[in-house]
Amino acid sequence: MFLVQPSEVVSSYFEEILHKDTHLKEFLDKYDQVLQTHHQLEALADLDSRYSSSMLKSRCYFELQLSKVYTNDILRKFELEVEGMYSCFSTSKLNADGPVVTYIVQEQTEVDGNRREMRD
């Protein structure tokens, strides 16, 4: 357990169960309830994903493999990341320090019909 400073924001995960007057036993009981609810929601998402077929966005074999492992929600997040990779048109190595390599990536986006280049 860690202390939360007054200027820090408490995660939304804990907002409902953690207040300045919350006793430890009350917190642990509520935390256990939240975990159980979270696990139940995960189990329902797993079942839903297992028994529903989703439309894959590419013909890549790795996407088919991931669709068998991940829930539909996580697969959609992954697909958005892959789509974002397609808009990256220029990468250049900025720095290499042992196993850590830093790149500059330019991304082309379209907002209201106007193309913009962005640097990350």
Image (spheres, rainbow, N blue to C red):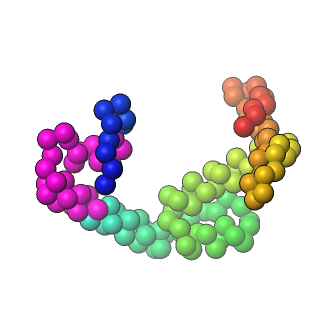
On the rendered structure, is 10 left or right of 66? Answer: left
Indicate whether residue 21 is drawn in magenta: yes
Compared with residue 10, is residue 44 higher up or lower down, i.e. above or below?
below
Q: Can you say which quadrant of the picture contains the C terminus?
A: top right
Q: Is residue 48 visible?
A: yes
Q: Is residue 97 magenta?
A: no
Say which residue appears at 74% left-offset and 67% top-offset: 60
Q: Which residues are magenta?
A: 10-35
Position of 36 relative to 1 (above/below): below
- Majority SS type along the magenta span: helix
Q: Is residue 8 left or right of residue 109?
A: left
Q: Nearer the viewer, residue 18 or 52?
A: 18
- Residue 108 figure quarter: top right
Q: If the image is split into quadrants, where does the N terminus sit?
A: bottom left
Instruction: Name the foreground residue: 36 vs 92.
Output: 92
Q: Is residue 92 left or right of residue 54?
A: right
Q: Image point 37% across, 70% down: which residue? A: 43
Which residue appears at 33% of the width and 36% of the height? 5
Please tell me whether residue 85 is drawn above or below residue 99 in the rendered image: above
Q: Position of residue 95 (x, y in %)?
A: 81, 45
Q: Is residue 86 visible?
A: no
Residue 36 x %, y %: 26, 65
Whole-percent x, y for residue 104 in the image: 79, 41
Is 47 or 24 nearer to us in this picture?
Answer: 24
What is the x, y in percent for residue 91? 84, 45
Residue pictured at 70% horizontal, 50% vertical: 83
In this rendering, the count of numbered labels is: 0
Quadrant in which residue 21 is drawn: top left
| Quadrant of the rendered image containing residue 28 | bottom left
